[in-house]
Image (cartoon, rainbow, N blue to C red):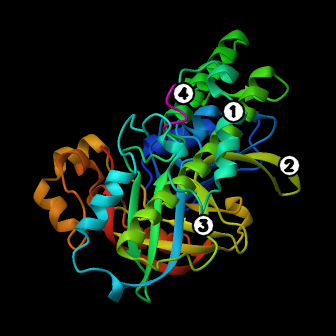
Amino acid sequence: MKVIKEADNFPIKLWPDDLGEKELQQLRNIASLPFIHRHIAVMPDAHLGIGCTIGSVIPTKKAIIPAAVGVDIGCGMMAVHTNWKAEKLPDNLLKIRSSIERAVPLGVGQGNKDDAIFKKPVTRFLSQKSLNWFLKQSDPENLWNIKAPKWRNQLGSLGSGNHFIEICLDENDDVWVMLHSGSRGVGNQIAKRFIEKAKEDMRVHHINLPDKDISYLSEGTQNFQDYIDAVEWAQQYASYNRRFMMDVIFAELNHYLPEIQPLEEVINCHHNYVEKENHFGENVYVTRKGAIRARKDDIGIIPGSMGAKSFIVRGKGNPESFHSCSHGAGRKMSRTKARKTFSMDDLDRQTQGVELNKRKSILDEIPGAYKDIDHVMQLQSDLVEVLHTLKQVVCIKGD
């Protein structure tokens, strides 16, 4: 871990060894804010974001930066260790992949049709009672003046980009089911609404910032309280979204693997979120923008890219990282550069052995566009210990 301390800025504690000047400038901008608590922690998978470097852990007192939390509020991972062994999987996994792809809505703007969400099987990971309560207890469109008409139908849907569903094998040839998704369109609309409110607050109060994308909301204001309420709701939505999908996935798997069952408590963790926590003796808001919580004995998920390894980890509770670790491998090139750099032949080679619908629309997700996950894990050996190493045999992605 390296420490940067400049002028009157708060310290920046760095776990990565490859940050460029653009990322460092983003971090300096955040470190210049007067409400930072002690220092900023930067995880080893960090890379350029909008206003705030992805992979940042930002503790704040009496203020929150909505753009740091991001536009996919509550985005995160869920993993289930099953009783199934690799030897019991069929030789050809195409039918399983196709079945899940038909059952789970995939891609930008996609969701369940009409009231189908109330008819899908939810028993293992999300009770029907909890689902019905959540769907009926509030209306985010009216509460926060946003347009998200699909919010109910999109519960239980994957999305696009780096979101995925995978069937994986661990070092003991045990089968795991893993997925990555967030709060879908409604979380995006909530985020955009409050990012604009934060920018408006800066204009009204004549607060000049080095980057308008680090505009913040101050505790004690109505905008701040509304954001806290909205972000908590969106984080709950994201968690339920992952649980709902996992129920649907297991219902499909039961057609092909009739006795498959979870072995233990599932892992369901956010990596784009804000939460009030106690660090260094003070209660502060901790924004993890592309990082997971890694308190001592916390169990978390650090995925690689499609075709690369993923890890189930146990936190070491390192106070200097604010009990955090990386959320994945982290991109080493933009999506545009990846599409220009790699070919479909490259995608085929780098995902060899994975049952995947290989197509141009996911070329920017090629493993070569991401950092080496093994190196990322080496850089954070003081943050987590590895419990299981997973390798996917099926990967599902939306366009």
Q: From the viewer's perspective, is the residue at label 2 or at label 4 nearer?
A: 4
Q: In terms of sequence position, does the residue under pointer 4 or pointer 3 come before the other?
A: 4
Magenta region, residue range: 149-153
Disc 4 packing (10 Å; few <14; some 14–19; many ≥20): many
Q: Does the stretch in magenta take in 364?
A: no
- Dot label at residue 189: 4
Q: From the viewer's perspective, is the residue at label 2 or at label 3 nearer?
A: 3
| Res. 160 visible in picture | yes
Assess whether mark 3 and mark 4 are in contact (beta carbons under 8 angstroms): no
| Res. 332 visible in picture | no
Disc 2 packing (10 Å; few <14; some 14–19; many ≥20): some
Farthest residue, direction right = 281
| Residue, disc 3 | 267
Q: Residue at x 59, y 65 (%)?
A: 124
- Dot label at residue 230: 1
How much space separates mark 3 and mark 1, taking CA atoms? 24 Å
Q: Secondary structure at mark 4?
A: helix
- Dot label at residue 203: none
Q: Secondary structure at mark 1?
A: helix
Along the line of sight, the residue nearer the viewer: 360 or 65? 360
Q: Amino acid at mark 1?
A: Ala
Q: Amino acid at mark 2?
A: Asn
Q: In terms of sequence position, does the residue under pointer 2 or pointer 3 come before the other?
A: 3
Farthest residue, direction top = 204
Task: Indicate the quadrant containing the N terminus: top left, top right, bottom left or bottom right.
Answer: bottom right
